[in-house]
Image (cartoon, grey):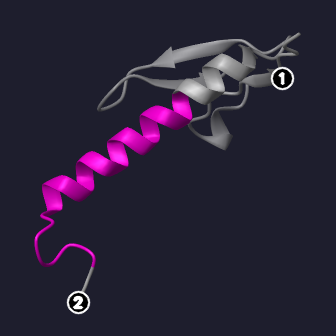
Amino acid sequence: MSYVSGPRSEADVWFDRVIELHSLVVEVLENFELSFPEGKKIMRVPAIAMTCLVEGEREKGVQMPIRLKPLIKG
């Protein structure tokens, strides 16, 4: 029997994944400082949806470089 068969529907499984993703995002935001790398300019480029490119690195495709620095809680 697969995970989505039986009493649990696909909607229940989808909801569980959303909650897990939410928990991961909260942990990252609480425990890390997010910043952009120095010396790189981020450009917003229209496509089907707005995308991000690093200026001068268009050949690398869509990217959004972010630096994570652990916060020291005391």
Residue at position x 15%, y 78% from top?
Answer: 5
Tell me the quadrant of the picture where the N terminus can be found.
Answer: bottom left
Please count the marks in the image.
2
Instruction: Evaluate whether residue 38 shows in this view.
Output: yes
Compared across the picture, whether 41 is left or right of 62 comes to: right
Circle 2 is placed at which residue position?
Answer: 1
Q: Where in the figure is residue 7, as x and y percent of width and height?
A: 10, 70
Q: CA–CA distance between discs 2 and 1? A: 42 Å
Q: Amino acid under label 2? A: Met
Residue 51 in magenta? no
Dot 1 corresponds to which residue? 70
Decide: few, some or many residues near mark 1? Use Cα within 10 Å; few <14, some 14-19, many ≥20: few
Reading the chain from its start, which is encountered first: label 2 or label 1?
A: 2
Q: Report the side of 68 relative to 63 (left or right).
A: right
Residue projecting furthest to the bottom? 1
Q: Position of residue 52 (x, y in %)?
A: 54, 24
Is 47 located above or below residue 6 in the figure? above
What's drawn in magenta, residue-wise? 3-25
